[in-house]
Structure formats: structure tokens, C-alpha cells
Image (tube, rainbow, N blue to C red):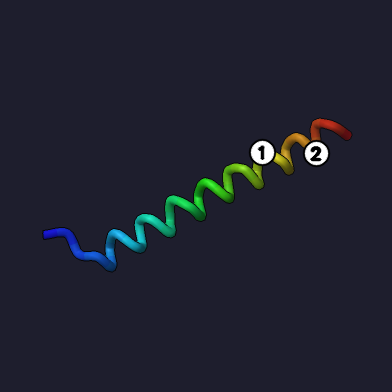
Amino acid sequence: MFPLIVLAIVFILTIFMTFFGVLLKHISACFLGK
């Protein structure tokens, strides 16, 4: 049985990492643009 709390933490971590990755890509594009 998989704990629901662990599943929620993994889900939030995945969303956070995806958001951080997109943000990092935008920052890199900004620096490369200049």
C-alpha cells in the first residue's frame, strides 16, 4: 500500500521541478538574447 501523503509530496515535487525547469529555460533564453 502506497501512502497518500508520499504520493502528494512526489506530485508537488514534480510540478515544482517542471516549473523550475521552465523558469530556468526562460532565464537562459533571456541571457542568450542579450
Picture coordinates of residue 1 (x, y %)? 11, 59
Q: Residue at x 71, y 41 (%)?
A: 26
Q: Quadrant of residue 31?
A: top right
Task: Give the side of residue 33 with respect to residue 10, left or right.
Answer: right
Identify the mark at residue 34; answer none if there is no mark.
none
Residue lying farthest bottom? 5
Q: Is residue 20 left or right of residue 14?
A: right
Kindly identify the amino acid type of the residue bearing the numbered disc 1: Lys
Query: Looking at the image, which residue sits at the far left?
Result: 1
Residue 5: give x, y in percent of width and height: 28, 68
Q: Quadrant of the C terminus?
A: top right
* Secondary-structure class at tag 2: helix
Snapshot quadrant of residue 21: top right
Residue 30 vertical position relative to residue 20 in the rendered view, above or below = above
Q: What amino acid does circle 2 point to?
A: Cys
Give the labeled residue for mark 2.
30
Question: Which is more N-terminal, label 2 or label 1?
Answer: 1
Q: Nearer the viewer, residue 14 or 31?
A: 14
What residue is drawn where x is 43% and y is 51%?
A: 14
x 72%, y 37%: residue: 28
Residue, x 80% and y 38% (percent of image)? 30
Identify the mark at residue 25; answer none if there is no mark: 1
Answer with left or right where residue 23 lies relative to residue 3.
right
**Residue that lies at the very extreme toward the top in this rendered image:** 32
| SS of the residue under disc 1 | helix
Using a 10 Å C-alpha cutoff, classify the residue at mark 1 as few (fewer than 14 neighbours), some (14 to 19) or many (20 or more).
Answer: few
